[in-house]
């Protein structure tokens, strides 16, 4: 998990009696304090990892409070500094406020006023540090150039397995709960193997309409299918030379499984109405939400097709088995959401951290990504700073959801409609209202393939 900042107060005061009394009062309020008798002693306590704040008197021998403030500003412009001054120095303190000081108090000050100012400063500092950690974690994930985010032992083993299998260029069965990132694993197997740069064709077996499944997978000759006179290249043939992803193959209709088995065994496809089969150079990756043996036992999956696919298996661990990766994943999704939604508001990590630690994420990475988007949209645990209106946020979210779905499904509107649960007319109304460039998305999707 993202660690909370080490929130200490550096209290700088050369008057020993006032210093001791103030430190005692702050500690009674549960605030961690480091007492410093000079500005030089305080500077020695501040480094790049310092997560606290500074409260300093202005009038001190040697380096005074204003000089200390200038030095601290140079180290970290976002470090809150509260200045304590006598009545004669109020003008100087106001000038420091213009330069970025957090607040100032005049002597003699009420302890409650100091405590309130300290708590406000600590809250601001926590937000700054938490958001820095989010940005750093997101940048680290981005630098890896790997869509599989996380450094847990489970993910390290998964990466090693992917590299080994990618170079072997053999068919692979990828198993894992919904939302764990099975398609990303398949994409990495393709990108790291000898077929990179060739087509990567993803078929969502759960979304195959029964009446059109054969035509979609195997293709058809001209004049062989009602209501069309043109021929069609099936998805399997389109993947020849590259990689064919059979996503959620556990949902494939039994009526198609026998034909698919012949294709995998013979490495040739026979389009509907064609005179002869066509040879295909296949590399097949199949994914399943549950172990295929369970589907075989239930009679919903052919045992011979299972044994044909069961050459090498990769298991993608659920999020509850890789708790150490949750913070890094969340940071990456927050960065993605801020970029897509153009909402750079700061996130209150206290509430977020509690959910990241306690929730078991049954929807896995997909659920965590959705949560990160909601946080950035302001629905949960986000400060009001930098937010747009609610209608604008809803509009941005709808646009991002539709564009993401179209990219996921290669620009195919019918597949996006099924995923989003929208009627066709409503979908096109939203595309027009939100200004979505549908032809451009389709073009980019084809290029990526």
Image: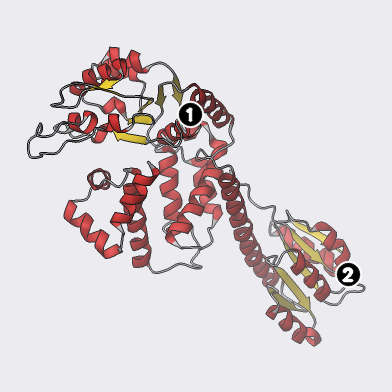
Name the front one of labels 2 and 1: 1
Give percent across and percent down for residue 395: 33, 62
Mark 2 or mark 1: whose residue is earlier in sequence: 2
Q: Within 10 Å of the Cα at label 1, are there few (<14), some (14-19), or many (20+) other Cα atoms?
A: some
Residue at the (37%, 34%) spot, across then down:
178
Picture mark count: 2
Residue placed farthest to the front in the image?
275
Image spot of residue 241 (x, y percent): 38, 29
At 73% across and 57% down in the image, what residue appears?
8
Mark 2 residue element: loop
State the residue lying farthest toward the left: 226
Q: Nearer the viewer, residue 102 or 397?
A: 397
- Dividing the picture into quadrants, the one containing residue 163 is top right
Q: Is residue 194 visible?
A: yes
The quarter in which the N terminus is drawn is top right
Residue at x 30%, y 63% (from the top left corner): 434
Quadrant for the C terminus, please.
top left
Return the residue nearer the eye: 253 or 135. Answer: 253
Q: Residue 132: x, y in percent?
A: 62, 56
Above or below for 131 versus 69: above
Residue 329 in the image: state x and y as whole percent.
52, 44
Q: Is residue 241 above or below residue 338?
A: above
Q: Nearer the viewer, residue 242 or 98?
A: 242
Answer few, some or many: residues within 10 Å of disc 2's Cα (few below 14, many 20 plus, some between 14 and 19). some
Q: Is residue 404 left or right of residue 85?
A: left
- Residue at the disc numbered 2: 14
Task: Please indicate, yes or no, whether residue 378 appears anywhere in the rendered image.
Answer: no
| Circle 2/circle 1 CB separation < 8 Å | no
Residue 262 versus residue 387 in the image, above or below: above
- Residue underneath mark 1: 194
């Amino acid at each position: 998990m993202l660690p909370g900042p080490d929130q200490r107060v550096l209290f700088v005061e050369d008057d020993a009696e006032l210093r001791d009394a103030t430190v005692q009062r702050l500690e009674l309020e549960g605030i961690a304090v480091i007492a410093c008798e000079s500005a030089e002693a305080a500077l020695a306590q501040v480094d790049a990892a310092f997560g606290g704040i500074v409260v300093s008197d202005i009038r001190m021998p040697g380096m005074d409070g204003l000089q200390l403030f200038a030095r601290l500003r140079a180290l970290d412009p976002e470090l809150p500094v509260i200045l304590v001054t006598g009545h004669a120095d109020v003008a100087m303190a106001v000038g420091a406020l213009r330069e970025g000081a957090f607040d100032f108090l005049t002597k003699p000050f009420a302890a409650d006023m100091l405590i309130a100012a300290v708590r406000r400063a600590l809250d601001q500092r926590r937000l700054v540090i938490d958001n820095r950690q989010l940005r750093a974690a997101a940048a680290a994930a981005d630098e890896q150039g790997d869509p599989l985010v996380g450094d847990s032992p489970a993910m390290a083993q998964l990466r090693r397995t992917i590299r080994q299998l990618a170079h072997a260029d053999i068919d692979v069965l990828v198993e894992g709960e919904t939302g764990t990132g099975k398609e990303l694993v398949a994409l990495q197997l393709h990108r790291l193997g000898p077929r990179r740069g060739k087509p990567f064709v993803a078929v969502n077996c759960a979304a195959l309409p029964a009446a059109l499944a054969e035509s979609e997978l195997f293709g058809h000759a001209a004049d062989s299918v009602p209501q069309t006179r043109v021929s069609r290249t099936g998805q399997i043939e389109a993947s020849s030379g590259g990689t064919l992803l059979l996503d959620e193959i556990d949902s494939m209709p039994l009526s198609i499984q026998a034909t698919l088995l012949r294709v995998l065994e013979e490495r040739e496809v026979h389009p509907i109405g064609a005179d002869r089969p066509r040879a295909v150079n296949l590399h097949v990756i199949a994914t399943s939400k549950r172990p295929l043996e369970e589907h075989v036992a239930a009679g919903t999956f052919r045992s011979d097709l299972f044994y044909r696919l069961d050459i090498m298996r990769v298991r993608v661990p659920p999020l509850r088995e890789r708790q150490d990766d949750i913070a890094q994943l969340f940071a990456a999704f927050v960065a993605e959401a801020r970029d897509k939604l153009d909402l750079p508001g700061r996130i209150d990590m206290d509430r977020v951290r509690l959910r990241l630690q306690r929730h078991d994420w049954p929807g896995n990475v997909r659920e965590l990504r959705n949560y990160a988007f909601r946080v950035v949209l302001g629905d949960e645990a986000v400060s009001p700073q930098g937010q747009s209106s609610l209608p604008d946020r809803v509009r941005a979210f709808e646009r991002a959801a539709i564009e993401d779905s179209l990219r996921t499904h290669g620009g195919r509107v019918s597949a996006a409609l099924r995923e989003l649960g929208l009627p066709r007319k409503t979908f096109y109304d939203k595309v027009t209202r939100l200004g979505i460039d549908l032809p451009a998305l389709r073009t980019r999707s084809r290029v990526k393939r």
